[in-house]
Image (cartoon, helix red, strand yellow):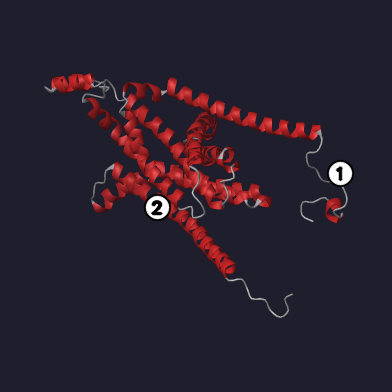
Amino acid sequence: MGNRDPIEAHADDSRDLYDVSTWEPRSSLDGLSVRLYRGILTTLRAIVILLAVLILLSQFLLGSIGVTFAQDPYSVGLVVLSVAPAVGLAAYVYFSDITSSEPLELIVGTFMLGILFAGFAAVLNTVLGPVVRGVPAAFGVLGAVAGSLLFFYLVVGPVEESVKLLAVRLYPYRDESFDAVIDGAVYGAAAGLGFATIENALYITRNIGAAGTEMALGAALTTAGLGWVAAGLADLSIPVVQSGASGIIGIFESGGRITALRALAGPGHVIYSAFAGYYLGLAKFNSEHAGPIVVKGLVIASLIHATYNVMVGFVPAVFSIAASQFLGVAIPDLVAFFAFVVVYDTIFGLALFRKISRYRTLYREVRGRSDREEAFPPEATEFDP
């Protein structure tokens, strides 16, 4: 009988079971109830988005992002550069959707929600971090290590992956264009890209803001005997900004390292969210097990995410020390970090690739069989009417 009441399961179609064991909107009260329900859901979604907008505005107005962007507009270029690898990975997931192309407005909307909802993760990480880390830290060094592990696996991973999945659930999931399991991976990747973008912006602007005393580019050009260049830029109303002792070059010098680091970290968010999004898509088309399926996706994404956060803190350093001690080769920290991230993201990127490839293969097989059946219907036998 499944999820049907015994009366509904055994009654014939001639019986009216409305408001007894079945229900559909008939009366004015029914219609009012439907409208109230939809209104409550819409209001709750609006409140969630409004809170996210307020948090983002506070980060821009009170944090480092707004100040740095206003003083150093060229720093926006660093943020763009930092997300370039993540954009490439998200584009691959997008074009891997063999079923149909997802509407651009849904992709952009999910990306924007990924940016907005990152603020929820920042608040929760800040509030829960001292609690989860602080209690074990009272037991010494081992306690502090345990506290960090708990923080990454119980707070950072689950919280950040949940808010990214929330961006997918609140917007594209409800649209009729979300009509295949693989669409979840596409929108999950878009949400991850949005999250990575605002996270990179925070890291980069904080790094530039802490660079120390800065000097105007115009003054630097004049000192170098290139005052005419500064005057020309001013005449063209091109902002002549500062950074360090070398003007715009100083911006890229002071922010170049953190930009490179964030460029390597960004694709991870796309990978984690694509996994969680894929399982959200799977849940949409398997409603009887939707809850466990969504949890499975979040567990996978959170474990990959948290393990990265844990390992990136010591694996590159161990690699550098081992290379120096046993091979006599001095490996710069940035190179060791780059090697670790490339290997880690490649492993799980390939796992994501295999999952998407399996879907694409089965889709082709099923569509091919369906097309053949439609093109060549079976011949009627002597037993057919």
Viewed as shown, does residue 182 lie left or right of 27? Answer: left
Q: Position of residue 147 (x, y in %)?
A: 51, 37
Q: Where is residue 269 in the image (x, y as percent from the top left)?
A: 45, 42
Residue bearing the label numbered 1: 20
**Disc 2 versus disc 1: distance between alpha carbons?**
56 Å
Viewer-side label of 2, 1: 1
Viewed as shown, does residue 57 lie left or right of 27? Answer: left
User: Which type of secondary structure does the marked residue at label 2 adopt?
Assistant: helix
Specify the farthest residue to the bottom: 382
Q: Looking at the image, is 325 positioned above or below residue 362?
A: above
Front one among 101 and 204: 101
User: Which type of secondary structure does the marked residue at label 1 adopt?
Assistant: loop
Q: Residue at x 50, y 60 (%)?
A: 358
**Residue 152: mark in rendering:** none
Disc 1: CA contacts within 10 A as few (<14), some (14-19) or many (>=20): few
Q: Position of residue 228 (x, y in %)?
A: 14, 21
Disc 2: CA contacts within 10 A as few (<14), some (14-19) or many (>=20): some
Q: Looking at the image, is 378 positioned above or below residue 305?
A: below
Front one among 224 and 110: 110
Specify the farthest residue to the front: 385
Viewed as shown, does residue 6 lie left or right of 226? Answer: right
Cβ atoms under marks 2 and 1 closer than 8 Å: no
Kind of residue at badge 1: Val
Q: Where is residue 356 in the image (x, y as percent from the top left)?
A: 49, 55
Kind of residue at badge 2: Thr
**Residue 346: mark in rendering:** 2
Is residue 76 in view? yes
Whichever of callouts 2 and 1 sits on the residue coming sooner in the sequence is: 1
Specify the farthest residue to the left: 225
